[in-house]
Structure formats: structure tokens, C-alpha cells
Amino acid sequence: MRSRFRFHSPTLAPVPTSQQFLIPPFERFRFTLGFILATGLGWFCIWLVLRSSVQDPLMPAQAIQRGLGSALVTGLVSGLVVSAMQWWVLRRYLADWLWILTGATGYVLLTVSLEASWGWIGVLTTAPPVVDFFETLSPAWVVVASGGLRVLLATVCAFWLGLTQWLFLRRYTRSNLWWLGVPAIAVLLSSSFAVLSVLLLSAGVRLPLETNVLAAGILGTTQAISLCALKKQSVNLALPDHNSLLRAAPEILDYDLVQSLARQLQFRLNNAWTTEHLNVDSLIYLVGVTQTGAIAAFCPINYPAIEQLHEIPLPALTQADEPKHRGQTEPLARFEVTFLPSGSLQIHAWRGVPLFSVAVSMLTLVLTSSAIVAFSIGLTR
């Protein structure tokens, strides 16, 4: 039995909105977790390499203030190590190793500009009028003013990292100018949680946070969520049937409903795929399912799936469900269905976990990890 699908020469065509993202929506959670762990591991490696020379690449303490030469070395090592770790996760979606080079450049510009700014601030604060002004303030306000100044400088200098990474990302993504502010947002978030910890302590609630874990985790979370929000420059998925329901039908946006339909589809395909499995390659299909669970349409999205279409139950199930869906305007949930040579089945919904849910869960993980490390350090002292 030959496939009834004819594969025309590939052409760019509209695809569901959720599949236009740089990171496939159904891989958001796994990618974000891996990216955060890679960033944290990079910062840990920096600590091992530089020890007392660096405390926090985005919000350095006074130990880093040892001249522009030291800042350059710190930025170069930090940028190379952290960006290399991040690229190990990102390379599945962007294979270009220039992410490492742009990250290293951004870190160098960040640390050097921050060091230079501290030098100018040092000169300014020694001026007699400034000294007289600070003497009129209470010690608490002096701490607040100095801390706020550090955060402000780190936020401004972090734009260098955003700029260099944006120059790289704009080659592969679109509508990406907002990436310039991503590292700065990470600085502000880290500072906000650190301030919250101090305020809770003053209120009698002890919640210490380890600053390096907090900063690395929030930087990784912020960048990972932002990468998930970026859309690809071009979508090179070609669907053979130009009148396909998969192309014309709106997308079901209810995440819970999509997950329920995924379980129904998994159950039906597992029950129907009972014959001897003859496929020798992974067969990948895009499948559209209605709100009632009926299979409305499907399309192969790799070449083996075209040639071995007769090995799978999708054609028979689609024909059986044809009377159950009303027309081309009915919303569809789209799934990537992979029939593996081992006989197992994988189903991924093209509409993945909402980014807000991913962000909240990852920030919770980062804060918890930071608190655990802080408590552990406190117990060992």
C-alpha cells in the first residue's frame, strides 16, 4: 500500500503560532531547568577558578575592585565558562558556537565598565561636599544609599551583556529588541529578593539567601524564559497539503484541555497499533485533534514518515473520525506524534506549559536552593 500523500518540494508556509518559537513549547520546562543548571554550574566553576577574585559577575563585591586588568580577566573567564555551559544546552536549538564568544564579550564589557564606574564613584564620594552630605545621614540610610548605587550601576552595565547577546540572537530570531534589558531585569530581580530577605529579617523572619546561588539562578531563569519567548526568524516546516485542516484551523488554547486530548490520543493509538511494528525509522507526524477527541487530520513531517505511512494506524483512525468533526473552522489541538522503531509511542502537544507557570516554578526552585545553601553555610560556621 503506497502513501496517499505526495511530498511537494519544500516551501515555507504558515504553521501554528506555538511552533514558531525558538524553543518548542513542549520542551520549555526541560530546557529551562537545563539552562538554569548550566548557568549555576558555570558560576560554580568560576568560583573554583577565581576563588576570592570574584563573588558575583553581575553584582560584584569590593573584592572585585582591583583595577581594570583584574576586571577584564574576571569578565573573560566568567563569560567563557558561563556561556560555554549555557551553549551546551542551547546548541540543540542554536548550534552556532558564537553564543560563547558574544557572552564572553558581554561579560568583559560588563565587568570593565562596572569597575570603571566604581572608580569614578570613588573619586566622587571623596569630594568634601559629598562627604559632608553623607555625614548628615543615619548609618541605615548610608547602607541603603550605597546598596542602591551598586544595584543601579550593575543594572546599567548589564545592558552590555544584553547588547552582545542580542547581536547574536537577531540573526536567528525576530521581534527581539527587548532582549537588551534581560540581564538588567535579572539584576533587579536578584536585588529585590535580597532586599526582601533583609526586610523579613528586620521583621523577625529569618530567611537567608545565598547571593551567588540567587544571582546565578535568577540570571539563568530570566534568560531561559526569554529564550522560550523568542520566535524563530523563519519556520522551515512545510506541510504538503495546502488545504489541510492543520494549516487552516485555529488552535485550541486551553492547556488543560490539550493535555486531556493528548492522553486520549495516546490511549487510542496504543490500542490501534497492535500489529507487528515494521518501521525501521522514527516516524514523526503532526496530528490535529478536535475538542471532542476526534482525529481531524495528520501530516508527516519527516521523510521516513512519508514512505512508511502504511505501517501506522493514523490513516484508518482519521477516516473513521471524519463524520465526528464539523468543518475546517473547528479549533484543533496539534500534537507531534512519533512512532519509534522499538514499538513505543511519543506524543508532545505543540502548545506547551505556559511560560508564566514555568517562570513561577523555576523562581521557587531558585529561592529554595538559595535558602538551603545559605542555611548549610550557616550550620558549618
Image (cartoon, rainbow, N blue to C red):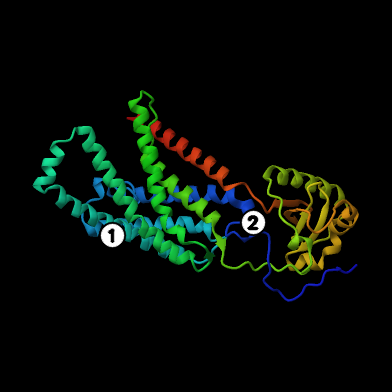
**Between marks 2 and 1, how big is the CA–CA gap?**
41 Å
Most foreground residue, 54 or 165? 165
Q: Quadrant of residue 198?
A: top left
Q: Residues within 10 Å of mark 1 (few under 14, many from 20)?
A: many
User: For the residue marked with disc 1, what is the amino acid?
Assistant: Leu
The residue lying at 83 percent from left, 69 percent from top is 5
Picture quadrant where residue 257 is located? top right
Quadrant containing the C terminus in the rendered view = top left
Q: Which residue is mark 2?
A: 18
Q: Which residue matches tag 1?
A: 72
Q: Residue 163, how many percent across, how many down?
A: 40, 62
> Which quadrant is the N terminus positioned in?
bottom right
- Please tell me which of labels 2 and 1 falls first in the chain: 2
Q: Position of residue 3 (x, y in %)?
A: 85, 68
Pick the front one: 341 or 2: 2
Outermost top residue: 204
Residue 254, position as x, y percentages in the image? 69, 45
Choose mark 2 or mark 1, whichever is in front: 2
Q: Nearer the viewer, residue 41 or 322?
A: 322
> Circle 2: is it few (<14), some (14-19), or many (20+) Cα within 10 Å?
some
Q: Residue lying farthest front? A: 329
Residue 21 visible, this orientation: yes
- Left or right side of 367 for 275: right
Residue 223 in the image: above or below residue 104:
above
Q: Is residue 125 left or right of residue 232?
A: left
* Three-letter amino acid code at the position of disc 2: Ser
Q: Position of residue 293 (x, y in %)?
A: 81, 47
**Picture residue at 83% right of the left edge, 47% below the top:** 268
- Residue 334's label in the rendered image is none
